[in-house]
Amino acid sequence: MHLDRPRLSASRAAFLASLAISALTACGGDPKPPPVPDPPVVTLTVPEPNTAAPTLKIRLSVSGCDAVAQSEIYDRDVFLKTVPYTSGSMEFELASNEIKYTSGLSAKLALHAKVTCSDGRSNVSQPQAATFLPVTKVVKDPDPNGQVVTDFFVAEGYGTGVNFIGCGNPTTGVGTLFRVDATGKFQQSVAMGVPCNASTVYTDLNPTTNKRWVWTPGARAVAVHQNFTISGASKPTIFLTSLSMMDNGDALIADDDNIVYRLPHDSGIGAPKWTFASPWPLVAPPLQKGSDILVAFMKQPEVTTATVLQIVVARLAANGTGDLVPVSERAILNYNGDFGSPPLASFSPDGTILYLAFPLGNNQSSIQACRVDVTGCEGSGLKWNSPALPVPLQFVLPYAAGTRVAAIGLQRVWFLNADTGAIVNKDGKSVDASGTLQVVQVQLGRATSPEFYLLNGSGPGSLPQEIVAVDSGEKGELFRYEVSSSLSCSVDNDNRLWMRTGNSLVQTLPLADYRKVRP
């Protein structure tokens, strides 16, 4: 019997056709869109994140691009420059004029890179913090562990002929004076027998004798010629508290027994030319004024109450011999005090004024400018009283050829007009050390210049870690730079600032260049 095959209904045929189409699509019909490629990986690093150098070096690496179309460097949202990145890890430099100093000096930067691939994909790196102080040049020791100059040093000379002189303690333990040139190359040394520490002082070179005095408080002093020969020294039994140089190169020294000596610069370890034994505590380093030596000390009047003391200025004959007695004495101030708390005091460079700092209530201080040729610091004898300063003072220092007086507290410094006593700081605000740092040293510009540098450290006797530069009190802070190791500074005969930062030596830009970006 013949049976016909059943016919498919129209609806079932349509269903089977749709299955066939689905199968065809699954086996090679229209494809799904490809996945979107990941953005490139961009890494920016700063090899020396805290640096004083002519340029700031950065390192850039990119992965995930067949080719890089553009790479840009930013400080936060501020575009700095485009760099020609091609492949691998590449180093680039940011020049000092390519940085926007919106955060002051030294520049506190947050750098990142934005990279765009040739196919349009882009990404940015994580921000990297950097501190950058632009300088003229950096001098490094050929030995990676070597230090170009001693911890503290003085610069002398002009232009490319600058040398650096500093006191150090080599393995022998004998304090030694070293000289290196502007490339850091060793030139000379001489053993001095003076211990070298953070308090060691170097006077300027005397133009007549070509000698300077090097001395350490609590120890002794030596006279060193420019050719590094020693021609004079104090006796080891004299423990110095102050030293100032006379016009002829001799030293006026005072010791912890309140004895003043005139120490010749050319007598070896010889006897002083004269001595003056003060029966009362000295309050200021002695000073030459023409044929006189001015000595200031506290004294109790013969007829007085127990709380009243006098500040007396005695005049000694500069060219006397033996044991001197004063040519004259003048009581320039009566005040309430005690011998255990002498006032801070400094003579003006010309010897006409004695600046005296006294404590006030609530941890405040005030400075009086008293004429030394008038009895009593009142009426014509009082040049001025300063405004009250809101801290105890540590030092009173005339500078800028006697036109300014620096009132130095533990962390804050004010600058006073030497004619009026008025505060000249910008906006009347003190220049301060950062955080918990303290002012441990100051560096002045050349004799007639208004520059003033604060060197701040963790406390007395410590190595400074921060420098704050002031080109003039009226303009205020110029730049501030801090390191984790230590630093120090000096100015050469062109008034250019040199800094030791860690083991390196740097010459800063002229201060006027910094002021251009910090009006």
Image (spheres, helix red, strand yellow):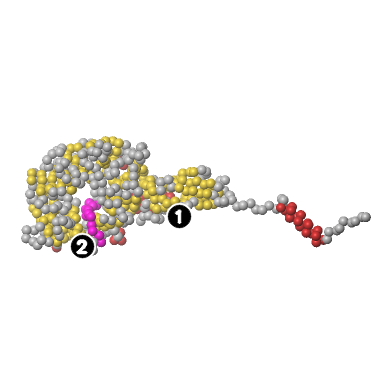
Circle 1: residue type? Arg
Residue depicted at x 13% and y 53%: 281
Query: What is the x, y in percent for residue 80?
Result: 46, 51
Q: Which residues are magenta?
A: 385-404
In the image, residue 398 lies in the stretch drawn in magenta: yes
Res 408 visible: yes
Circle 2: residue type? Leu
Mark 2, Cα crowd under 10 Å, few <14 / some 14-19 / many 20+, is some
Q: Which residue is mark 2?
A: 360
Query: What is the x, y in percent for residue 423?
Result: 25, 60
Number of numbered discs: 2
Q: Which residue is mark 1?
A: 76
Q: Is residue 83 above or below residue 422?
A: above
Determine the CA span between mark 1 and mark 2.
Answer: 47 Å
Mark 1, Cα crowd under 10 Å, few <14 / some 14-19 / many 20+, is some
State the image quarter where residue 313 is shown.
bottom left
| Earlier-in-chain disc, 1 versus 2 | 1
Q: Is residue 150 left or right of residue 103?
A: left
Q: Residue 433 versus residue 362: which sits nearer the camera?
A: 362
Q: Is residue 434 left or right of residue 334?
A: right
Query: What is the x, y in percent for residue 196?
Result: 24, 43
Is disc 1 in contact with disc 2, using a CB cutoff of under 8 Å? no
Q: Residue 133 versus residue 466: which sits nearer the camera?
A: 466
Looking at the image, the residue that sits furthest to the left is 303
